[in-house]
Structures are given as structure tokens and as C-alpha cells.
Image (cartoon, coloured by chain):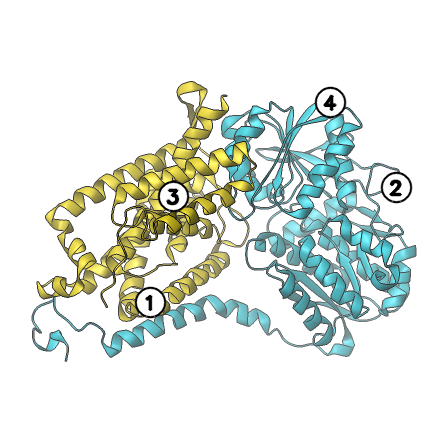
């Protein structure tokens, strides 16, 4: 095994997982215009769905896990969006605290259902890549899912089906005046973004210990990616996520593992100090 | 007036925020909170027993947050030990009860819960806590209130150092679990037994794990065993991939995994993908959980160190079987076995002292020998249970995971001397 190519490959795959989570969060920030701290809980939900499928005694099928996780998370996201987020979405602090409370409630619920003990899924195959690297199965799957999601979102947003999303993102009053059901679009977007987080959780479940609190770290990292990349340009978010994944891995290897997170956060602070509106350079606007 | 009134037929138009929806926004979180909290509320108010009829043990463990898995095993084991003691007639003619406190893995909470257990729950003694940091806080509060504290898990040398330096103040504190040097001795003995020449140490970036890595490096060096790599990932946001790459690139004979928590599972998976055949030795904890065995990556040998295991001695086997019968799964041999023994030792000390008076119990603990699942506990001058390779000491064991369970591989004859 050669260290540098492996570190670069792992960095890209790690970054893709950040980007996958960040894509859903970016959608919520852009369309629903709330800071959603329950995103990590949906990631955890996806992982537990994957575990539930794998514990049925049959071979683990990632496609089944992804589809089921997406369906359940979408339904729950729509319920949450319609019953809780929509009625109070103009009270930003209430939504932020409320979604954090949901996240903690979910953790307690997961602990009650599955217990506090870690659960695991068999790791799956890995295969040989170029330059003597080992390509992790789950990493390749999340990179593929990430690329497909970003391409799909790009196509959606440039088509007439994406017009309501763009209009709401720019001006809700105008969107409402042309007859778009803004509330419906909001809760459907919330549901779809929750489904994306659950897909990320289901894909990454074989790489991790599945515990109720496992969504916390991906939530923080995806928030960082969304805020620093600036939400307007999807590919900026993807490139930033991959850049941070590489920085984290190379920093941990060449400095020390405990410096990896510090280096990542220091870089984020430096970028925000230079470009407060994020790399894409568009200020967040809110229409209440 | 909302737009629904103007266009009642059009589903695309409606009020922005109706009163009903606001009520829904309140009802949903309240309802979900009640559903999630109900079991905890019911558990928090068990039928009360008369204080004079019982001896009460305060159990401090993290039942929520990142260390909840270890804390849950801790409480299960303490419960089992109390049930066993009560089945044998209790102590001093009284039933034994436990009062459980959730420390959340936080020093401030552990301190305040210690105070609550002593002043409001009127516990006769304490068992806990889990992390070294929180145990140091508990130790301060318990000593100030002259309450006996048995420490089952926390391994930092600072606990016994303090007892040695300020014996008058900390004389009520006894550690049942192994100290860092004792733990390192056991691990080094295993490495020597396996004829290891180079090992990589991977841990989590918390105080006691670094202590363990440093002490193991020194002890192993006496036998000519060198460290090929030492890395500590951050516990909050661990960078598993680069640590796994670095450990694999250093070409060790074995990787010693110092983290007993859930992150050890994630690291093991990453490492196995890169180096499928290199042996891994875990210090115990999450990797000792038999429920995970079917899904563990066993392409290479996976060893786990434990205080006791089924088959390591007759008391250990009896304990494991009782645990399995009571909770439906085998103990991990660390975060459950040591608390079980801590409660068992405490009850035996009450019986030997003939009283629950703290000074009498301290005297009994200092002089006596107390059988537990892992062996017979005796305490040295710093109130540390004597673990090690010598005759008559507690020794622990190392198992190797197979698909159908753990096999004892160290000591070679299966039983401690």
C-alpha cells in the first residue's frame, strides 16, 4: 500500500460524504430558509434502517436500504415540515431550537428502540484501485450517489420543474403571486432533503458504528460546507467538501490525527474572514 | 384575512399561518417528547422502600450521550450483583438497593449527582464513575462527605497517586479496576507471548488513552518490543482513514487498539479494509460485545482483553451465565464485569465489617480478600486492587474472536494462576 495516493483517494471519498449531507441541507436553507439542526437525525435514521435490513439474516442490499431509508425519511420529513416547520418558519430562532430538540428527541427514541450499544453492518467488499490503493466499497457508493445527486439537482433546477424552487428561493411573495403553493413546496423540499440525509446514512452505515448520536458530526461538517460554500452554487459545495476531506486526511497523516479537525476549522475560519458570504459570494437573503 | 377565503376552490392558495397550524406546531413536539420520555419517567419513580430496611448503593454511570453504551452495561451489571446479594440474604440483615444516576459523561454532572446521591438519596456507598475525568470529580465530592467510593472503570494513575499523597483525605476511595500500569503490563505480557517485535498503538485523544500508550511503550521496550506507530484520533470527529493508513504503512506485527468505545469499531473496519490479515488487540469494551461478533471483520485475528470471560474460572463462568440469563446477551468482560465485582466487593466488605459505617468498611477493604467474577480482590497501600502477572493476583484474560464466539488464548491454560 502506498500512503499518499491512498490518503488522496480517501480524502475525496470522505469529502463526497460531506457533500452528500450538505446538498440536502443546502436545499433546506435555500428553499425553506431555516437552519435545520435535525438533519443529523435523518442521517442516523438512514443508518438504522440499513442496520434493520441487514439484521434480517439475509445478505445486505444497499439499494434496498437506500430506497427504504429515503422513503421513511421523506415521509417523516414531510410530516415534520408540514406540522412543525411551516407554521413557525418565520421565527428563525424557534425553528433552529425546535429542530435541535427534534434531533435530541430522535436520539433518545433511537436509544429506546435499539439501545445505546453500537450496532454494526458487515463492511462489504473493497477492491484494488490505481497506484496500489484500496477503494472502499461504501466510499465509492457514496461518491457515485453524490455525483448522481448533484447532477440530478443541476438538471432539476435548470428545468421547468425546478422553477418553483428557484422562485421561492429568490422571492416567496412573487412565487405565491404566480400561484405556487409555497408551503407545499417547502414541506416537500424538507422531506426530500431529509431523504438525502437518510440516503447518506444508509450508504455510510457499513463504515461506522451505528449509535444514536452518530449524526452529530456529519451535521456540523455539512453545516460548515453549506455556509462556507455559499449555497448558491452546488458545485462549489462539492469542491469545498472534497477539499476539506483532503485537507483533513493529509493534515492528520503529516501533522497528527488530533490536528486534523483543528486544521479544518482554522481553514474554514480563514475563508469566512476573507469571504464572509462564502466562496460563492452570495449573501443569504430571507423573505419573511 | 387569508387567501383561502378568496380562492376556496384552489388548492394552491391558502393562509400562510393559521391558528390550527400553530397549535399543531406545539402539539407535535409535546407529543413526541411524551412518547420518548414516558419510559424514563416510569423508571424514575419506582415503588419506594423504607430507608431503614435497606442499604443503598449509589451507581454513577453515563446513561445518555456518547458513552451511554458502557454506562448501560455498567448499570446492568450492578443490578445483577445486587440481585445476587439479595438472593443470598442481603447484608447486615437488610436488603440492598441501588440508586442510579446518569452522569452524561460530564464532570460537572457527575459531581452534582454525587452530591444528590449522598445528601438526598442517603446512599451508604458509591460505585462509579465511568470516565477518568468524571471519576476525579466524584472522588473529590465523595471524600469530602466521607462516603466510600469503589471505582470500577476509570484507569488514570492520578486516582491512586492522590490516595497515596493525601491518604487522610482520600482514604474512602478504592479502585477495583486495573490501573494504567497494570493494564499495560497485561497487554505487554500478551505481546511477548505472541513474539511480537513491532506494534502500532492507536487510541482516542483523551488523557488516560495517551497514558496507556506511553506506559505500554516503556514496558514493552523492556522485552525489545518497539512501537512502529502511535496515533490518537479525536474522540469528537475522528479521522479514522489517515490513522488507519499510517498504522498499516508502519508494517506492525500487531495493532493495539486502546479505545474501548464505539469508535474502535469504526477504526477496525477502516484498518481491516487496508490490512486484512494484520492482528489487532483491543483493550476491551465495545469490541468485546458478543452481539457484534457475526458482523466483525475477522479476516485477520482479533484479540480482546477482558477482566474475565466464560471459561477463565468457575466464578467467571457462573457470572457470565447469570448475566446471559438475566439480560439475554453475554457481558463484554470490562464495562460490566468490573462494576459487577465492585458491587460484590462492597457487599462483602459490609458483611466483613459488620456495619455500613464508612470507617469500618475502609478498614475491612484494606485488610480483607474479596472474591469476585475476575478473581480475588486485595487492595495495596494506594487502595488499588492488585492486578498483574504474579501469584495470587487478578490477571484478566485475552480472547480471540471466532464467528461462533470468543476463545480464551491468554493465559495459555485458560485460567489465571
The CA span between labels 1 and 3 is 24 Å
Badge 4 element: loop
The CA span between labels 2 and 3 is 53 Å
Badge 3 element: helix
Badge 2 element: loop
Please identify, in this view, whether the residue under mark 1 or under mark 2 is nearer the observer: 1
In the depicted structure, whether residue A204 falls above or below residue B323: above
Q: Chain of mark 3?
A: A
Badge 1 element: helix
Q: Earlier in the sequence, mark 1 or mark 3?
A: 3
**Are the residues at dot 2 and dot 3 in contact (C-beta closer than 8 Å)?**
no
Task: Name the residue located 35 percent from the left edge and 37 percent from the top edge.
Answer: A142
Q: Chain of mark 1?
A: A
Chain A on-screen colour? yellow
Residue matched to label 1 = A92
The CA span between labels 1 and 2 is 65 Å
Q: Which chain is cyan?
A: B
Q: Chain of mark 2?
A: B
Residue matched to label 3 = A18
Residue matched to label 4 = B195
As drawn, the label of residue B392 is 2
Left or right of residue A182: residue B323? right
Give the x, y percent position of residue B318. 74, 48
In the depicted structure, whether residue B235 falls above or below residue A183: above
As drawn, the label of residue A165 is none
User: For this rendering, which residue is in front, B400 or A38?
Assistant: A38
Amino acid at each position: 500500500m502506498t500512503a499518499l495516493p491512498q490518503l488522496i483517494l480517501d480524502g475525496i471519498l470522505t469529502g463526497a460524504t460531506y457533500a452528500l449531507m450538505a446538498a440536502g441541507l443546502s436545499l433546506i436553507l435555500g428553499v425553506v430558509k431555516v437552519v435545520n439542526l435535525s438533519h443529523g437525525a435523518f442521517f442516523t435514521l438512514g443508518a438504522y434502517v440499513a442496520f434493520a435490513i441487514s439484521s434480517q439474516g439475509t445478505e445486505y442490499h444497499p439499494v434496498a436500504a437506500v430506497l427504504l431509508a429515503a422513503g421513511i425519511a421523506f415521509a417523516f420529513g414531510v410530516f415534520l415540515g408540514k406540522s412543525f416547520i411551516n407554521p413557525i418558519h418565520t421565527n428563525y430562532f424557534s425553528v433552529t431550537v425546535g429542530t435541535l430538540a427534534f434531533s435530541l428527541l430522535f436520539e433518545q427514541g433511537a436509544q429506546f428502540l435499539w439501545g445505546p450499544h453500537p450496532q454494526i453492518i458487515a463492511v462489504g467488499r473493497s477492491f484494488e484501485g490505481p497506484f496500489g490503493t484500496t477503494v472502499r466499497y461504501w466510499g465509492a457508493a457514496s461518491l457515485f450517489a453524490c455525483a448522481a445527486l448533484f447532477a440530478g439537482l443541476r438538471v432539476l433546477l435548470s428545468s421547468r420543474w425546478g422553477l418553483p424552487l428557484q422562485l421561492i428561493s429568490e422571492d416567496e411573495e412573487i412565487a405565491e403571486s404566480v400561484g405556487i403553493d409555497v408551503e407545499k413546496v417547502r414541506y416537500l423540499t424538507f422531506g426530500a432533503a431529509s431523504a438525502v440525509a437518510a440516503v447518506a446514512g444508509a450508504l455510510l452505515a457499513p463504515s461506522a458504528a451505528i449509535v444514536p448520536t452518530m449524526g452529530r458530526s456529519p451535521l456540523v461538517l455539512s453545516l460548515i460546507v453549506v455556509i462556507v460554500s455559499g449555497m448558491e452554487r452546488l458545485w462549489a459545495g462539492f469542491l469545498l467538501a472534497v477539499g476539506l476531506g483532503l485537507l483533513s486526511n493529509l493534515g492528520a497523516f503529516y501533522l497528527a490525527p488530533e490536528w486534523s479537525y483543528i486544521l479544518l476549522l482554522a481553514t474554514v475560519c480563514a475563508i469566512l474572514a476573507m469571504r464572509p458570504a462564502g466562496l460563492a459570494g452570495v449573501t443569504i437573503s430571507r423573505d419573511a | 384575512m387569508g387567501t383561502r377565503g378568496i380562492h376556496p376552490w384552489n388548492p394552491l392558495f391558502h393562509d400562510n399561518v393559521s391558528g390550527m397550524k400553530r397549535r399543531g406546531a406545539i402539539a407535535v413536539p409535546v407529543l413526541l417528547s411524551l412518547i420518548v420520555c414516558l419510559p424514563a419517567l416510569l423508571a424514575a419513580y419506582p415503588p419506594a422502600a423504607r430507608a431503614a430496611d435497606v442499604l443503598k448503593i449509589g451507581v454513577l454511570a453515563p446513561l445518555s450521550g456518547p458513552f451511554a453504551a458502557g454506562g448501560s452495561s455498567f448499570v446492568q451489571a450492578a443490578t445483577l450483583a445486587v440481585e445476587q446479594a439479595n438472593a443470598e440474604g442481603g447484608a447486615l440483615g437488610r436488603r440492598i438497593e441501588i440508586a442510579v444516576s446518569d452522569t452524561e459523561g460530564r464532570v460537572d454532572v457527575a459531581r452534582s449527582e454525587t452530591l444528590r446521591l449522598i445528601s438526598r438519596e442517603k446512599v451508604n456507598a458509591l460505585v462509579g464513575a465511568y470516565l477518568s475525568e468524571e471519576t476525579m470529580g466524584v472522588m473529590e465530592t465523595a471524600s469530602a462527605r466521607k462516603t466510600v467510593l469503589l471505582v470500577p472503570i476509570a484507569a488514570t494513575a492520578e486516582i491512586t497517586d492522590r490516595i497515596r499523597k493525601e491518604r487522610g483525605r482520600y482514604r474512602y476511595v478504592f479502585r477495583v479496576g486495573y490501573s494504567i500500569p497494570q493494564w499495560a503490563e497485561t497487554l505487554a505480557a500478551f505481546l511477548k507471548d505472541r513474539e511480537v517485535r513491532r506494534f502500532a498503538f492507536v487510541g482516542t485523544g483523551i488523557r488516560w488513552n495517551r497514558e496507556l500508550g506511553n506506559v505500554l511503550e516503556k514496558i514493552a521496550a523492556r522485552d525489545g518490543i518497539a512501537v512502529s506507530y502511535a496515533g490518537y484520533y479525536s474522540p469528537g470527529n475522528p479521522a479514522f482513514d489517515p490513522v488507519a493508513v499510517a498504522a498499516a504503512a508502519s508494517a506492525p506485527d500487531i495493532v493495539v487498539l486502546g479505545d474501548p468505545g464505539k469508535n474502535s469499531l469504526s477504526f477496525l473496519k477502516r484498518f481491516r479494509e487496508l490490512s486484512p490479515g494484520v492482528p489487532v488487540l483491543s483493550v476491551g469494551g465495545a469490541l468485546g460485545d458478543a452481539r457484534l461478533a457475526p458482523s466483525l471483520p475477522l479476516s485477520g485475528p482479533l484479540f480482546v482483553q477482558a477482566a474475565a470471560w466464560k471459561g477463565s474460572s468457575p466464578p467467571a463462568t457462573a457470572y457470565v451465565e447469570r448475566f446471559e440469563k438475566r439480560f439475554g446477551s453475554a457481558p463484554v468482560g470490562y464495562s460490566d464485569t468490573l462494576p459487577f465485582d465492585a458491587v460484590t466487593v462492597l457487599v462483602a466488605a459490609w458483611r466483613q465489617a459488620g456495619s455500613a459505617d464508612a470507617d469500618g468498611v475502609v478498614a475491612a477493604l484494606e485488610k480483607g480478600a474479596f472474591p469476585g467474577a475476575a478473581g480475588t480482590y486485595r487492595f495495596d497501600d494506594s487502595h488499588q486492587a492488585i492486578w498483574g502477572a504474579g501469584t495470587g493476583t487478578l490477571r484478566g484474560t485475552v480472547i480471540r474472536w471466532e464467528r461462533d464466539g470468543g476463545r480464551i488464548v491468554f493465559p495459555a491454560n485458560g485460567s489465571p494462576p
